[in-house]
Amino acid sequence: MGALENKVDTLYICHGFGCEYRTAVSFNAQDKRELRTLLKRGAKSPEAERKAISQAVQWQEIRVGPVVGSSDDIGGLDMGNGNVRGQMDCIDEATNTTSLLTYASAQGWLKYHRVTRPASRGYFLDGKYPHASAVVVDETTQVPWVVDSWRLSNGKAPDILHLSKWMHMTSADLVKPHIQ
């Protein structure tokens, strides 16, 4: 979708829907300490690590907001903001979350999960709107989990769900945040 690969401590943040725009954001020593500290909170178990991943995603969205212009990113389906700098659709969100988790993994900060390709669901023909999300796999169970930061506005907790459950969800199922 036009995403760029991380370079050392620089992540390329997608925005504008479908990665229309890519803005480089470099993590300094303080950023790295904060992110490492957040993720270390998950060292006790896979469940704890998923909670820490949620906090890391929230941290990233807040951290990059002023640089990218995404501090006021509106969650969910908001077609009126397509091609608007700083606004993100699910492709942008999935790409950015995957970039963050890939960065964290490369630093050795994920103990129980490995990052894999984003997942997608919905094809209009099945009655669902197309949607994408970042995915991590629990190394102790081999169960894939989505880390979906699209539904809520910038800096809010992402939904973290079994991939199998997420694949069958519709917008009616998305009433409150889901962290399992």
Image: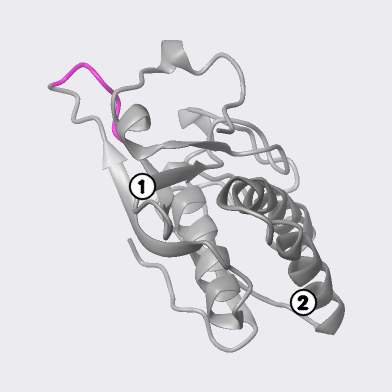
Percent x, y of residue 172: 43, 10
Position of the N terminus by quadrant: bottom left
Q: For the magenta stretch, what is the residue range?
A: 126-131
For image coordinates 51% across by 49% down, the residue present is: 93
| 168 in the magenta segment | no
For image coordinates 75% across by 47% down, the residue present is: 71
Q: Is residue 21 left or right of residue 31?
A: left
Mark 2 element type:
helix
Three-letter code, disc 1: Val
Q: Circle 1 sits on which residue?
A: 143
Q: Circle 2 sits on which residue?
A: 32
For image coordinates 66% across by 34% down, the residue present is: 153
Three-letter code, disc 2: Lys
| Crowding at mark 2 (Cα within 10 Å: few <14, some 14-19, many 20+) | some
Which secondary structure type mostly characterizes the magenta part of the structure? loop
- Vertical arrangement, residue 60 with respect to residue 160, above or below: below
Of the numbered discs 2 and 1, the one sitting upstream in the chain is 2
Badge nearest the viewer, 2 or 1: 1
Identify the image's colour scheme: rainbow, by chain, secondary structure or one colour: one colour
Q: Is residue 127 left or right of residue 34?
A: left
| 127 in the magenta segment | yes
